[in-house]
Image (cartoon, helix red, strand yellow):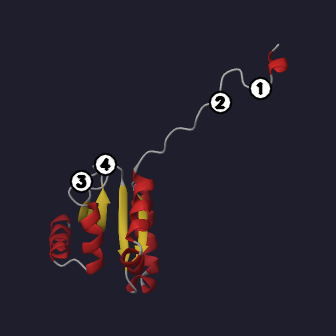
Amino acid sequence: MAKKLTTVAKNLRKRPTDVERLLWKHLRSKRFEGLKFRRQHPIGNYVVDFACLEKQIVIEVDGGQHTIEKNKDEERDRWLEREGYKVLRFWNNEVLTNIEGVTEVVMSNCLPHPPLTPPLKGGGKAEDRR
């Protein structure tokens, strides 16, 4: 099964959609915050559109056929999430018309959030500290 998925993935990489090509332009060669993304990458029994293994992020770009395959996509997402991956799904038109917004969402899910500022020591009114 693994060899078959690898062959499927290679064939998909040879024939990317216009949307995949556009998003890949932003993610490839560690251009995206120095993170390594893979495209058409096998994980388990699935081939995902894009994956950052280091951050365990999967990005799926969906066309109209995914409205019909919704149950299959949900099952796949649940499996990936059980394996520790966070799945980000975007519609084709989102990538084509708002690539900046899409990359912002990806970035916010890949980068660690800064810690909250701890409260100042001795906070409160001066008379409360006596």
Q: Residues within 10 Å of mark 3 (few under 14, many from 20)?
A: few
Mark toward the viewer: 4 or 2: 2
Q: Check disc 1 and give the amino acid type.
A: Gly
Residue 54 badge: 4
Farthest right residue? 127
N-term-proximal mark, 1 vs 4? 4
Q: Which quarter of the picture shows residue 79?
A: bottom left
Q: Nearer the viewer, residue 50 or 97?
A: 97
> Could you say whether the residue bearing mark 3 is in a helix, strand or loop?
loop
Say left or right for 108 vs 51.
Answer: right
Q: How many marks?
A: 4
Residue that appears at 44% across and 55% down: 109
Q: Check disc 2 and give the amino acid type.
A: Pro
Position in image of residue 19 (x %, y %): 30, 77
Residue 30 badge: 3
Residue that appears at 80% across and 19% down: 126
**Residue bearing mark 1:** 124
The answer to whether marks 3 and 2 mark residues whose Cβ atoms lie closer than 8 Å is no
> Could you say whether the residue bearing mark 2 is in a helix, strand or loop?
loop
N-term-proximal mark, 4 vs 2? 4
Q: Which quarter of the picture shows residue 58?
A: bottom left
Residue that appears at 37% across and 82% down: 63
Mark toward the viewer: 3 or 1: 1
Residue that appears at 42% across and 76% down: 94
N-term-proximal mark, 2 vs 1? 2
Mark toward the viewer: 1 or 4: 1
Residue 119 badge: 2
Q: Which quarter of the picture shows residue 61?
A: bottom left
Q: Check disc 3 and give the amino acid type.
A: Lys
> Could you say whether the residue bearing mark 4 is in a helix, strand or loop?
loop
